[in-house]
């Protein structure tokens, strides 16, 4: 998810560095973008905070979609127990 805003007529991406010291946004634009990053076998995987946030959001969206596709469990019948 790419978040951006307009500041002084210029579109600015809302990255961690842009918002870390608090920012007030009046014009928020959201855009889903496709990103890929490749690593060689055995290569150390290094992600910056923005990449980590992108991956976290992707995982959230994936789980949310899976959850919405799951069938609901049948309603449990209420049973009354006599304690007399």
Image (cartoon, rainbow, N blue to C red):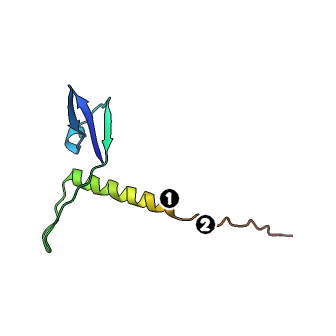
For the C terminus, the image quarter is bottom right
Count the marks. 2
Q: Position of residue 5 (x, y in %)?
A: 27, 34
Asked if 52 appears above or below 3 in the picture, the reply is: below
Q: Position of residue 37 (x, y in %)?
A: 18, 61
Q: Position of residue 49 (x, y in %)?
A: 22, 52
Rendered image quadrant of residue 8: top left
Between disc 1 and disc 2, whose residue precedes? 1
Judge from the rendering whether residue 43 lies leftward or rightward of residue 60; answer left or right.
Answer: left
Residue at horizontal 39%, vertical 60%? 62
Rendered image quadrant of residue 74: bottom right
Residue at horizontal 28%, vertical 57%? 55
The disc label shown at residue 18, or none: none
Q: Nearer the viewer, residue 5 or 43?
A: 5
Dot in front, 1 or 2: 1
From the image, tell me which residue sits under label 1: 68
Callout 1–callout 2 Cβ contact below 8 Å? no
Residue at horizontal 61%, vertical 66%? 73
Task: Name, please, the residue furthest toward the right.
Answer: 84
Rendered image quadrant of residue 7: top left
Judge from the rendering whether residue 67 lies leftward or rightward of residue 36; answer left or right.
Answer: right
Task: Name, please, the residue furthest toward the top.
Answer: 8
- Mark 2, Cα crowd under 10 Å, few <14 / some 14-19 / many 20+, is few
Q: In the structure shown, which secondary structural element does the residue marked by tag 1 occupy?
A: helix
From the image, tell me which residue sits under label 2: 73
What's the distance in space between the residues labelled 1 and 2, CA to CA?
13 Å
Q: Position of residue 32 (x, y in %)?
A: 31, 48
- Mark 1, Cα crowd under 10 Å, few <14 / some 14-19 / many 20+, is few
Q: Nearer the viewer, residue 46 or 63?
A: 63
Q: In the structure shown, which secondary structural element does the residue marked by tag 2 occupy?
A: loop
Asked if 16 appears above or below 28 in the picture, the reply is: below
């Amino acid at each position: 998810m790419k978040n951006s805003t307009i500041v002084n007529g210029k579109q600015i991406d809302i990255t961690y560095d842009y918002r870390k010291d608090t920012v007030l946004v009046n014009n928020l634009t959201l855009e889903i973008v496709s990103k890929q990053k490749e690593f060689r076998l055995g290569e150390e995987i290094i992600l910056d905070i923005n990449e980590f946030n992108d991956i976290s959001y992707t995982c959230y969206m994936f789980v949310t979609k899976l959850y919405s596709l799951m069938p609901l469990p049948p309603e449990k019948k209420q049973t009354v127990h006599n304690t007399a």
